[in-house]
Amino acid sequence: MLEIVDQARKTFQERYGSPPAAYGVAPGRVEVLGNHTDYNGGYVMSAAIDRVTVVAVRKSDSARCCIFARQKDAEATFTLDSIQRDPYDHWADYVKGVVVELLKAGIPVEPFEAVVTGNVPIGAGVSSSASLEVATAMALLELHNAILPRWEIAKLCRRAENEFVGMPCGILDQFSSVFGEENSILFLDTRNEEHEAIALPAGSFALILIHSMAQHTLVSGDYATRHRECMEAAAWFRERLGTHIQLLRDVSWEDFIRWEAQMPEPHRRRARHVIGENRRVLEGRDALRHGDVARLGEMMYASHESSRIHYENSTPELDLLVELARQYGAIGARLTGAGWGGATINLVQEQQMEAFAQQVSAEYTRQTGIQPVVHRCHISQGARAFREYGGAT
Ligand code: GLA
C-alpha cells in the first residue's frame, strides 16, 4: 500500500511541480456470497482486499480541475460549473460523478489537481470503479476538511455511479470498500443497512481470485437488463401479494415456490436466483459465525450454480474455473461480481494454496488456451484518508 502512495506522490510531484496535500486510499473487494442481491434489497457477504486505488489531491490555482490517471497515462480536465460525462475519458466519469455528489451534499469543493493510481485489477470483478469513487470522495473530503459519516460516503459514491455514470449498481462495492476490516468477511443487509464483520478462522484459509481473462459481452448492458427484469419480477409479485412487496427481498421462498409455475420467463429464473441467493447468504453467514467454513464453501458452489443456470451471468470460462476448483479441492468457489466474464473467488486451505493455483491455472490453460491471472487476496481494512506531512491545501 505504501508503495502505491509513494508512486502517487512522485507522479503528482512530476506532473504538478509540488507534492499533493491529501490522499484517499480505497480497496477493491471480492463478493463472497450474494450475487446480484444488493439492488434487490437483499443480503451480501464480501471482503475488502489488499488492492487499492490511491487518489492524491491538491487545490488548484486555476479554475479547472485536472485529473491524471497514471496507469492510463491520460488526463481529464473540467470546470466545476459544467461537469459532463465524457465517452472518451470514461474512467474520469467516476471521479466527476463523485464531485457532483459532494457538491450536492453541500461540500464546497474547490478546483483541484489529482493523480489517480493503484493496483486493483481492472475488469476482474473486484470493483476497481467503486475503489476509485471511494478514494476520490475520501481524498476530497480530507482536502476540504470535511467529514461525512461512512454510510453517507458509501451511498454518495453509489449515487455517483447510478446517476452520473449511469450504472444501476447496488451498494455492495462501495459499502465493502468503505467498511472493510482486516481478516473479516463483511455481512450486509442492504435493506436496513445492518452489517457485521465476521472473522475468518485465523491463519488457515486463503482467498484466491482467478481472473479468467475472458470477457464475453458488454457487461453494463446485461447488468441493466437483469436489473430491469428483477424490478419487473418484484412488480409481478406486488400485483399478487400486495404493496408490501417492493423488491424481490420481500418475497419469501415459500411464496416464490407457490407462484413459480405461473411466472413468465425469464422473470421466474431471475427471481429464483435472487430469492434463493438471499437464503444462501443467511446460511453462509450463520455457518461462518459458527466457524463452519465447509458449509460456507458449499453455499459458494451453490451460488455459482444458481448464477449459471438461473441468472445466466456466467461464462464457459468461469464455469470451467469453478469446476476445476472443485476438482482440485477448493472449499468453495464461484464467480464474483457482475459476471459475464471476469474472475472467480476461491476459498482454499492455506497450505494447499500454491498447488491449487498452479493446478487450476495449468488445466485451465490446457483446455482453453488462455492464461488466467491468479491473485492471492489478503482481506484488508477499508478506505482511509490522510494528509501529506507538512503539505498545504
Ligand atoms: C457489481 C455491482 C454490485 C453488485 C454485483 C453483483 O459488482 O456493482 O452492486 O450488484 O455486481 O452482485
Image (cartoon, rainbow, N blue to C red):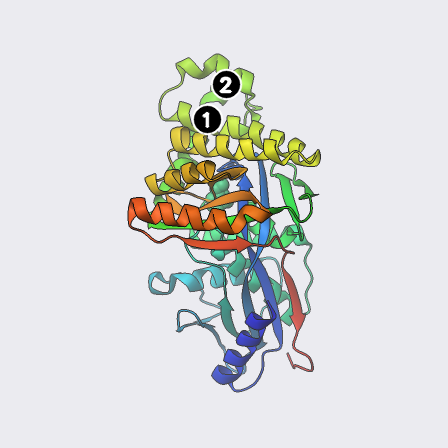
Q: Which residue bears the numbered disc 1?
A: 271
Q: Up-down: is 13 above or below 100?
A: below
Q: Residue furthest bottom?
A: 17
Q: Element type at marker 2?
A: helix
Q: Position of residue 288 (x, y in %)?
A: 66, 36
Residue 138 appears anywhere in the view: yes
Please tell me which of labels 2 and 1 falls first in the chain. Answer: 2
Tell whether 162 sits left or right of 192.
Answer: left
Q: Up-down: is 310 above or below 346?
A: above
Q: In which quarter of the image is the N terminus?
A: bottom right
Tell whether 258 sits left or right of 137.
Answer: left
Q: How crowded is mark 1: few (under 14 residues within 10 Å), some or many (20 or more)?
A: many
Foreground residue among 323 and 341? 323
CA gap between label 2 and label 1 equals: 8 Å
Residue 144 appears anywhere in the view: no
Q: Where is residue 43 in the image (x, y as percent from the top left)?
A: 59, 35
Q: Position of residue 331 (x, y in %)?
A: 55, 37
Q: Which residue bears the numbered disc 2?
A: 256
Tell me which residue sits at (55%, 43%) in the image: 348
Q: Element type at marker 1?
A: helix
Find out whether the residues at labels 2 and 1 contact each other: C-beta distance under 8 Å: yes
Residue 223: quarter of image: top left
Disc 1 marks which amino acid?
Answer: Ala
